[in-house]
Amino acid sequence: MRITDLLDKRSINLNGAPHSKKEALDQMVELMVRSGKINDKEAYRRLVYAREEESTTGVGEGIAIPHGKGDAVDRPGLAAMVVPEGVDFESLDGEPVSLIFLIAAPNTKDNIHLDVLSKLSVLMMDEEFAEALRHAGSAEEFLKIIDDADTEENKADAVAEVKEEGQKKILGVTSCPTGIAHTYMAAEAIEKAAKARNCFVKVETRGSGGAKNVLTQAEIDEADCIIVAADAQVPMDRFNGKRLIEVPVSEGISKAGALVEKALSGDVPVYKASGKDGSASVSSAKSGSIGHQVYTQLMNGVSHMLPFVVGGGILIALAFLIDGLSIDINSLSAEARANFGTITPVAKLFKDIGGTAFAFMFPVLAGFIAMAIGDRPALALGFVGGMMASQGKSGFLGALVVGFAAGYLVLALRKLCEKLPQAIEKIAPVLIYPVVGILGIGLLMNFVVEPIMGGINTALNNGLTGMGGSSKLVLGALLGAMMAVDMGGPFNKAAYVFGTASIASGNYDVMAAVMVGGMTPPCAIALATLLFKNKFNKEERENGPMNFIMGLAFITEGAIPYAASDPLHVLPACLIGSGVAGALSMLFKCTLMAPHGGIFVVPVVGNALMYLVALAVGTVVSAVLLGVFKKKVTV
């Protein structure tokens, strides 16, 4: 298949004049639709925009290659537009874009078109080729320029490069999440930069079509330096003992020359793999700023935790729904209401399964944060610390702390073990890291994290008891906010225990404020993912609406993945909205005689209509603040 097989003449515009990036993308989608390869224009437009929100496809040098892959595409295709005056595309180099190619890729197992599209991405790195396209006088000439370049590229591919005597040998690996354009453009940029410096170069690409041009062990052994430019997982243990540079894939495109210069300088650290058998360690752009590293480490934990939150949360919500439909909660005693969600056998089954999934949340969060820092040996430490946070008093904040602590503890142990005799160092991954590491994490949790959280818990309980006679509005706001501060930690537990104790003493307004405060964060997250799409990554947007279900079921934990990935911006927004909801519940004199169940126990809520108003207002306040506080997603 040739590139021109994918590019219809009707999808070429040589005199585009968009005034913004949005106009440019919309016009490109219209061009693509003309080719008849799109079955749902709006769905395809959403795919293109969703990809653009992950990171800009303006790759620099006046070129942009946006793309969308999904069921809205019947057949693979291309659309092209020349913008003589240029347009701001938020490109990596900040320069206006004057040449845009839009890619449409269907969800099929046949990936032949990916090879063709990747070839176009590579050709775009040739300045003469791009300039010729910009000055094409007609669509026919535009197509001929591409066809001629495609032929030359095929001839070049047929000639295998041979390393000359005395040449430096540089290897590379490139990969991006979508695996359509950036992977191949980074590979081409590194190859061009290396050849310009008379180096032998080979780059392995790991795109949507799988790994291509795979590096052999012999090539790795002979390499002077290896450049890994990746935003997706790459097998790393094979590079153990080699000089290695790790950067995001965007730097492989925009800073290829500097990377090759650094590789040739020899001032590059030697990579040390963590796996004892050299088989499975992976890495995903551990370099970059400290903020970027912390973000990727957090997201490694959050992305692995999310399925447990969604699966467990929905099953628990179903348990409440089943009990709500099966029994009259008004006929139950106060003691029986405490078991709401487990009263009927089917509801109990759902709640038990959901609860089991929830039990994995904090261990998985802490474990995979730790693994992102200390590789595989840190996983066990993080699991153990997370489990202790789950069973103790520290909640998800404790799991966050112990996840990072576990990762850096393994790094410290690795440094110490490097000084040991080689025979002892070899047993470190199977003996020293797990035994000493787990002991260290256990001691940290038992004697530092948990006592601090426990002390906070006791102080909060005493403080709330002392506020029993104070202003109802202030108490409601405080209880609502406490439910959102740590979502299962000492603040949350103190407020919840105070609410249940108030039921026993006949003060039902307190429990109402507590529950509405706990329902607000997941509902606000769900609303914010719909209103402010550019503030959340693709995975967060897709899972966002599930939070409506969990929020309405009083499952505050649904908001934890979002709070864990961006605590400095998400927690304040949730805290304020929950506080507003709690205060309004008190103002409206709402009451609640059940300690759990969310929307499913509305029959026992006093002044139910205004209770829902309090929840709605708190949700909107938090959602708007999330839109204000959170930064636009750029990775």
Image: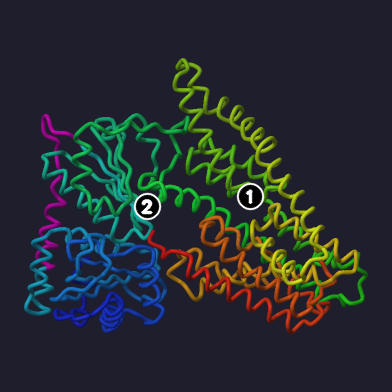
**Neighbourhood count class around disc 1 (C-alpha, 10 Å): few under 14, some 14–19, many 20 upward:** many
Work out which quarter of the rendered image holds the N terminus and state it: bottom left
Give the secondary structure at mark 2. Answer: loop
Q: Which of 267 and 26 is in front in this view?
A: 267
Q: Point out the stretch of residues depicted in magenta.
A: 146-169
Amino acid carrying mark 2 in the image? Asp
Amino acid carrying mark 1 in the image? Phe
Mark seen at residue 231: 2
Provide residue 583's location: percent of width, then percent of height: 70, 73
Was residue 148 drawn as part of the magenta stretch in this picture?
yes
Q: Distance between the residues labelled 2 and 1?
A: 25 Å
Which residue shows up at 79% across the image and 68% down it?
A: 511
* Residue identifier under label 1: 362
Give the secondary structure at mark 1. Answer: helix
Q: Quadrant of residue 322?
A: bottom right
Provide residue 182's location: percent of width, then percent of height: 29, 58
Q: Earlier in the sequence, mark 2 or mark 1?
A: 2
Work out which quarter of the rendered image holds the C terminus and state it: bottom left
